[in-house]
């Protein structure tokens, strides 16, 4: 990005996985969680209102409690 971050964006890949009809818990456990635990991610950004998303809440809990990934919260006025 223009700020110097390498962004890992799951949306396109996730849609391909969803098309295979895996359950959401399986996608989280077998796709998202290994990525979060890989050691390749050093910072995660959460949008305002992230708590309203089941997936973002799950990711936040894993990151906060079980990894060394730094968490940043994107301010509303950045959007």
Image: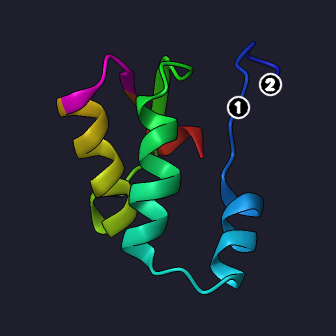
Task: Give the class, few, some or many, for how many residues have Cα within 10 Å of label 1's Cα (few <14, many ≥20).
Answer: few
Q: Earlier in the sequence, mark 2 or mark 1?
A: 2
Query: Percent x, y for residue 69?
Result: 38, 21
Q: Secondary structure at mark 2?
A: loop
In the picture, the disc for residue 42 is none
Say which residue appears at 32% left-offset and 16% top-offset: 68
| Circles 2 and 1 in contact, beta carbons < 8 Å | yes
Q: Is residue 70 magenta?
A: yes
In the picture, the disc for residue 7 is 1
Q: Is residue 9 above or below residue 13?
A: above
Q: Is residue 15 above or below residue 5?
A: below
For residue 60, side relative to residue 65 (left or right): right
Query: Percent x, y for residue 38?
Result: 49, 26
Task: Give the class, few, some or many, for how many residues have Cα within 10 Å of label 2's Cα (few <14, many ≥20).
Answer: few
User: What is the C-alpha distance between the residues marked 2 and 1?
Assistant: 7 Å
Say which residue appears at 69% left-offset and 46% top-offset: 9
Q: Is residue 48 above or below residue 75?
A: below
For residue 37, side relative to residue 78 (left or right): left
Locate the N terminus and report the quarter of the image it occupies: top right
Quarter where residue 25 is shown: bottom left
Write the start and end of the magenta stretch as one range: 66-71
Quarter where residue 66 is shown: top left
Q: Which residue is mark 2?
A: 1
Say which residue appears at 57% left-offset and 38% top-offset: 78
User: What coloring was used for the rendering?
Assistant: rainbow
Q: Secondary structure at mark 1?
A: loop
Between circles 2 and 1, the one closer to the viewer is 1
Say which residue appears at 75% left-offset and 71% top-offset: 16
């Amino acid at each position: 990005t223009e700020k110097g971050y390498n962004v890992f964006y799951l949306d396109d890949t996730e849609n391909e996985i969803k098309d295979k009809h895996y359950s959401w818990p399986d996608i989280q456990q077998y796709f998202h969680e290994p990525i979060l635990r890989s050691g390749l991610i050093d910072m995660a950004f959460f949008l305002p209102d992230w708590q309203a998303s089941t997936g973002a809440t799950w990711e936040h809990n894993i990151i906060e409690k079980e990894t060394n990934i730094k968490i940043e919260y994107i301010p509303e006025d950045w959007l």
